[in-house]
Amino acid sequence: MLKKIVSLLSENPYTVAVSHVFILALPITMLAACLFLMAELAGVFGWQSASVILNYMGEVTSYLFPILVNFYLASYYASMHRIHKGCAIFCALLGYMFISYQWGLLAIKVPIPNSLVVALLTAYASCLILHRFKRCAQFQRLTGMCDIWLNEDGQQLYRFVILAASTLTALLLGSTALSLVLSSVISPSLNLPLLNPLSFHDGLIYELVRGFLWGMGIHGHDFLQSYQSGLYDLSVANMADWRNLGDELNIISTNFYDFFTGIGGAGNTLGLVLCILLFGRCEGYRLLAKIVLIFSLFNINEPILFGIPVILNPIMLIPFMLTPLLSYLLAYSAISSGLIAPLTEVQPWITPPVLSGYLASGGEWSVALFQLGLIGLSMLFYYPFFRIMDNQAAGHSITVLMTNRMMKNDGVDSLNRVTGHFPSMQLHMMAQREIDMLRKQGQFALYYQPQVDSHSGRIVAVEALLRHIGADGTVTPPSFLSSYERLGLMAEVDDWVLKHAIADFVKLGRPSGCRLCINVSSASLAQPAFADRVCQTVVENGLIFSDICLEIREEGLVQDPRETAKMIAKLRARGIAIALDNFGSGYASLAHLSRFTFDRIKIDRSLIGNSGSDKGKSLFSVAVQLGAMSEAEVVVEGIEKAEQLMLAREQGASCVQGYYFFQPMPVQALSALKTWDAGEVALSS
């Protein structure tokens, strides 16, 4: 079950982005941790002035973490959705500032936003809104109103202002509406109970809430500050009364959480760090553990929380929440039963484990040994969950995190060398790198392969095929499409192909009796507005719907069969032909014929390629007959030999395509053909 959850997370581009952005901004967290540690140590040695300054610097530095996360995440989402990166970052940062101010989420010492959750949500919402505006036809007309009397620079500035203003307005309206709902509906009916700092049951609630808040990216100590402050005062007073008046010591004290349920920081994460060091196989994880060990020994765990990550990771959140609860129960039981002594001294929370137990109990070694036992127990508890992560990690070095690349514009590119923290994360990053390299080292282009009538030899259709042309002229077939599919960008690819293919077909003069065939993915079929976009593009270019044939691969039909059937019916009702591509290559070909209605059936090239044997001929014959039974035009792909052409013709295929007639060619070569007739020689051979 857990592995299935991890797999789902690894395939989600948004969880992938959040995890890697945490890694990218990790140096800020580590710098803040260093400053906090130095401030606490300065206070221990009595250097109060230096302690105040260092603590202030640490807090200001920590406030930069959500800002950087917001910045990097907006940049990443902008690349993923192919929207203006500058506009996305501007809207995300400004939205983060405005909404944080609106909700009162500004830091106390420095009036700047200090909410990781809001930083994440505003980055996501800004890019989502920008993406929707970009694809909205009405909005495109609005942004294009001034194109006539503005030059190119003016047009870009106008679009930037309109998009940014619209996005920020939508963000603020959404935030205001949510605020009104919470204040008028939820808040009046929500009565949070006051927690008794000395209560066993309330202490369990506090620990559970603290762990959950940390797991969601909310600083648990800050959110529950009133509880902690009250407990500190009660602890100091109770210990003074115990020494002076002989009163009974309370089991729960301010250090009870620090030294029993927060060993290494909230969640008893020192056990996780040691587990990684002792049992981790991924070199990236091990290096991270070595770097953050010193912080964990002083109970500072933000670097490990964002480095694994634990935050927003439902797998690691399980032991992160349950381990301190188990430690709480064991420590409370051990003290109440007299197995170990209660804590009699208030010590700084940064006091290292084992030493902290010894000092806080007045020199009782039993408490120090009990802490060692809790550390070992937390290692065992974290181990099976971390192992799931470790087994799937790519294991690349994370030393890049400590370089000066952190603030460069291509910072997200450095993620390609970072450890994968969910399975397939590295594949996502490799896909992003491949796409970026293709964009930088060449350009995409469309090639066209004609389809000919099997009897007359006349060209009856041309299929648009995506290619990449490198800077050296190398033409690459569309093997790179798997990277676009992994990142969820196939709909954008389809739109690009559709727009440019139709433009090229218009340049050809819309050859009489010839169709333009365009491949579409399941991602496009899943979009409700896809049919309208296709029809709008056709009409704007002066074509008629019957000029277009959309080819759908078999795997594109199984994503959402019901909605796909509706989309196919909508397109066919407009007059656009639909072809089933690669028929015979999948396990559900026959089921597709009975469930969907197609105008053309394209027999997969593998069937004609294996037709040299009797068995191969029989299978090919069955495929052609099944296509014909569906009352669709049958097209045979992969014709490379004369005998294959003769077989296709004998079996009743009306249209053929392959290297025997034409190889894929650029539109210039297609338009330069002296005749749109395949030639008598080709058919009579």
Image (cartoon, rainbow, N blue to C red):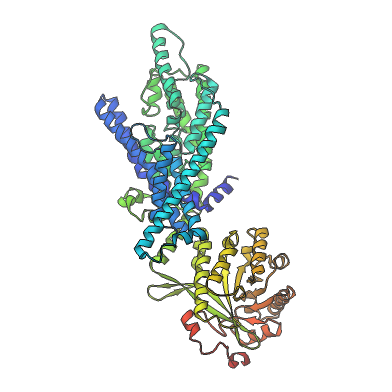
Q: Toward which corner of the image does residue 228 lie, by quadrant? A: top left
Of residue 636 and residue 76, the one placed in the foreground of this image is 76
Check the image and report above or below for 179 versus 200.
below
Q: Residue at 44% of width from left, 60% of height from top? A: 143
Q: Position of residue 683 (x, y in %)?
A: 62, 90
Q: Which part of the image, by quadrant, shows the C terminus?
A: bottom right
Extreme residue in the right direction = 629
Observer able to see residue 417: no
Q: Toward which corner of the image does residue 451 lie, by quadrant? A: bottom right
Indicate left or right for 158 with 173 as reference. left
Observer able to see residue 583: yes
Q: Position of residue 325 (x, y in %)?
A: 52, 29
Of residue 259 and residue 355, the one placed in the foreground of this image is 259
**Number of marks in the rendered image:** 0
Q: Position of residue 396 (x, y in %)?
A: 41, 53
Of residue 435 and residue 541, the one placed in the foreground of this image is 541
Extreme residue in the front direction = 149
Check the image and report above or below for 410 versus 366.
below
Check the image and report above or below for 68 versus 142.
above
Indicate left or right for 100 with 42 as reference. right
Q: Toward which corner of the image does residue 219 lie, by quadrant? A: top left
Q: Position of residue 81 (x, y in %)?
A: 47, 57
Indicate left or right for 531 with 260 as reference. right
Indicate left or right for 630 with 147 as reference. right
Of residue 111 and residue 485, the one placed in the foreground of this image is 111
Q: Which part of the image, by quadrant, shows the N terminus?
A: top right
